[in-house]
Amino acid sequence: MLSIGLILPDVLGTYGDDGNALVLRQRARMRGIDAEIHKIHLGDPVPDSLDLYCLGGGEDTAQILAAEHLLSDGGLQRAAAKGTPVLGICAGLQVLGWSFRAGGRVVDGVGLIDATTIALEKRAIGEVQSTPTGAGITAELTEPLTGFENHMGATILGPDAQPLGRVTRGVGNTDVYGADEVAADRSQLSAEGVVQGNVVCTYMHGPALARNPQLADLLLAKAMGIPLMELAPLDLEVVEKLRRERLA
Ligand code: GLN
């Protein structure tokens, strides 16, 4: 049984990001792999024994509650330390970094990724596309990534984090430079998302895994400890149609 943890859908669930867990469960089941979703709500302890974790986007004040809960609980950090894959979307990405700005202050994040979120010059809203970098555990990704972004946060990556993709449309992580030398690296401007260890993050809503089935399968494969190519392909015309439409 593959256990998919849906972390704090009550505060991190904008734009139907809960759908990422549904996509993972469905793509597993279509291959005859038993899978279930464990919803972990605000105040619930996060079990560190699940096979895969998903965090969605959220409003500024809601994501403060998420960060505080995850920091004090520690379960997600223990799971990540064991090498369990974690997917973070938008506010989920920001919460997994060192810090983010919300409610007029700097809020501590969980620190699973070497990323700091400051503010964009202008809110990023619209379609976003990228070419996967193939960094770290995403080495097997070949298909362009597509999603919808809506964020005010500007995420600057530190040296331990790599982008998930290079932006070909939209804004991605940031439109500003950070304050220090690392952050002044111009390549930050084309970065989209984060890959660090077994943590994969993106600003893409959609939900991202409905629009990017290869990324969904990569996460399933990592959760099962097998290479992506060992998962039988699923030819779903409706998903291909969606991708053709969005990437056009
Ligand atoms: N509140 C965050 C921001 O505006 C994240 C938004 C989101 O998850 N869509 O940057």
Image: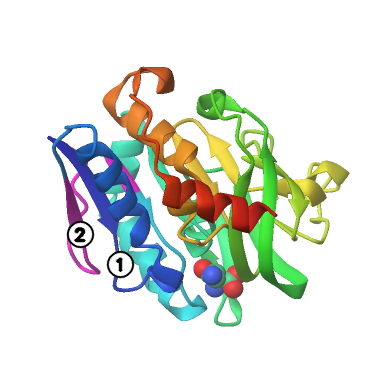
- Horizontal and vertical percent for residue 126? 67, 69
Q: Identify the residue at horizontal 45%, vertical 71% (top origin).
A: 15
The mark nearer the N terminus, 1 or 2, is 1
**In this rendering, position of residue 204 left or right of residue 154:** left
The residue wearing badge 1 is 9
**In this rendering, position of residue 169 left or right of residue 37:** right
Q: Is mark 2 within 8 Å of ligand 1?
A: no
Mark 1–mark 2 distance (CA, rounded to whole Å)? 7 Å
- Count every numbered label the image shows and give the total: 2
92, above or below 216, in the image? below
**Residue toward you, 157 or 248:** 248
SS majority, magenta: loop
The residue wearing badge 2 is 39
- Horizontal and vertical percent for residue 172? 70, 56
Amino acid identity at mark 1? Pro
Magenta-highlighted residues = 36-53
Residue 103: image tag: none
Give ligand 1's quarter of the image.
Answer: bottom right
